[in-house]
Amino acid sequence: MFVSPFGAEAQTRPSSLPPVTVTAPEQQRATSARPPRNAARSARTVRQARAPAPQTASDQGQGGRGALAVLSAQQALTEINNTPGGVAIVPAEAYKNSTVANTIKDILDYVPGVFAQPKWGDDTRLSIRGSGLSRNFHLRGVQLYMDGIPINTADGYGDFQEIDPTAYKYVEVYKGANALQFGANSLGGAINFVTATGRDPFPNGVSADMGAFGFKRLQANASGGNGPWDGFVTAATQASDGFRDHSFGSSTRVSGNVGYQFSPDAETRFYFNANEVRQRIPGTVTKQSALTNPEAAAPNNVTMDQQRNIDTVRIANKTTIRLDDTKIEFGAFGVDRHLMHPIFQWLDYRYKDYGAFAKVTDDRFIGGFRNRLVAGVNILNGNIDNQQFANISGQKGALLSSSIDRSKNTSFYVEDSFYFLPNVAAIAGTQFLYATRDRQDRFLSNGDQSGSTEFNLWSPKAGLLWNIDPTWQAFANISRSAEVPSFGESSNGAGGTPVIPFTSIRPQIATTYEIGTRMKRPDYAWEITAYRANIRDELQCLFGNLTGTCNVANADRTIHQGIEAGAGAAIFRGIFNNGPAPDKLWLNMAYTFNDFRFDNDPNFRNNLLPGAPRHYLRAELLYKNPTGFYFGPNVEWVPQAYFVDNANTVKTEAYALLGLKMGFDNGGPVSAYIEGRNLTNKAYIASTSIINQATATSPLFEPGNGRAVFAGMKYRW
């Protein structure tokens, strides 16, 4: 399993990389041969032969026992190795101790295939394999989870304001249909943010960060275990003036969980999460404004005092039971979210989402062959009580629309891995999604926009996984994903654009072919994956006007294909210290090649799809001393401008950003960093909205931040 960004070694830790454990099936076969039922044997020993990885003392933390429902980073790494496709684990040590860790970009910067660019505050344009490029607001095409609990609303849209990068022990990235186990049905796949428990090491901690544009943050966490009980809580409060005018914001986030172990093989855990976010929106501007006056906000955003404010409370329970060869997980969750969003109108939306899940993982030998079966069901339902008012300088005016939007989603999935050779598995699976969308219009003076729609979608998958040796894998798969449109895909025809009711929009269906290989060894690691997705009815911006208003409809056929490549290596060892733990010069790179285009479209022929760069590179070169000191430069490079419209008439600009960081982290209680970003103060375009046809004055562009320096310190015990 390739770890982006190559574990803590790639960023801060001076020690060698932790080993990757790819369980050798031939060893398992000898260990797990089933004796007669009356023979004395240890159930725990048999389980351990199939477990993702044994827990070490450092994994177990307090009380000498580990949490059953939450894997350690090393266990999660081994578990995700069972996936015959593009996946990644990002441990907290890879970003939390050496960067300001303020946005999701800081987490995912070195995961190839992921394009994440902050727009303002916590809002980010996130795309995996070209997912959701036509969505100019919020998120579509990637499903976000917190401890396996959905962050996205029931109708499919996602947001980043509830993501606190300081809160997680690791982050799992499942690209495309490799996220089948989450019931994910989107082209981009799923990202799961996993919090610590009271049984992790270093249970308590505090940190402080500050830097450019008035940024300041305080964070603290506390946890512990007592017999069968354990608990963890983390809280962070931050504020920033923002690089651009009218982009100041503040947030307070709290997450935690409480677990109880009935026995070493049965545990229940309760989760809670709460967020209060207040954020001004500077808006998109023309290309000229973005490059010559990047700090300026869109005038209309200032006049209307545009904002995105959100309050969220999330609670959940997950129970885990281990039997001899089987692990059973089940639980339920509920989310209450209030969005207060003055933009072109004053949006007052109240979301109530709820659901349940159950999953069975069975790993045993059948007729002398190892077989791993994963099956489950996910239910995600919810409703949106939405009201839209006139926006009068940031204050509510007259009511302009009101509806109740209801969504229901039930997915069943099954995936079986059969090792027909000791180190080669044939994998087959499928998912069935039943989804409904229903709108009850309560504001009828402008017509009745009520309606409902229903979807029944199958998404099969087949693949091969070859464990070449305990640190090297090759894989291939063919999969289908089916993405149901959200209510945000409907249009009221603003700005002269056509009315497209949500009931007229079909689901986006993609068939993806993927092949790749990954290796991770102490002094080098790499991954390379090639894929091609043939997409029917892609949710795409096909109608709009010259001011940037875009309506989503179904394109006929499109193609998303590309290469995801990552590499890390100690290119020099023992420069000044040639002992048992030598110093190193470590090179870390993540490169993504994107080729997204229409496929003989009647209007746009074979034009490139807008919204993402064709080439994207992140690289860093770090000197790492065994004392914990590290220092080095980094670069972000988009060598080729990309289009912002389907007609391929207007482009962004190419750019290269230079950064530098220095710090101390030896894995002990104290760590500190200082980081410089965009040191040449390059004016560049970080993100864009897209449209069907743009002009030189179309306000589609989000300027990137100017020169910035951040510093922070963490203490844990």
Image (cartoon, grey):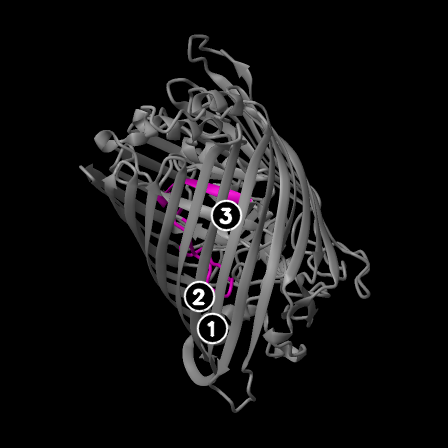
Q: Are marks 1 and 2 in contact (CB under 8 Å)?
A: yes
Q: Which mark is residue 406?
A: 1
Q: Which mark is residue 181?
A: 3
Q: In the rendered view of the protein, which quadrant contains the C terminus?
A: top left
What's the amino acid at mark 2? Asn
Residue 168 is covered by the magenta coloring: yes
Say whether residue 629 is visible: yes
Mark 3 or mark 2, which has the lower sequence index? 3
Q: Identify the image quadrant of residue 450.
A: bottom right
What's the amino acid at mark 3? Gln
Query: What segment carries the magenta color?
Result: 148-174
Give the SS element for disc 2: strand
Q: Relative to the observer, which residue lies in front, 291 or 191?
A: 191
Q: Which mark is residue 678?
A: none
Report x, y in % for residue 323: 35, 38
Q: Residues within 10 Å of mark 3 (few under 14, many from 20)?
A: many
Does 200 appear above or below 181? above
Mark 1 or 3: in front is 3
| Relative side of 547 to 172, left or right | right
Q: Relative to the observer, which residue lies in front, 430 or 609?
A: 430
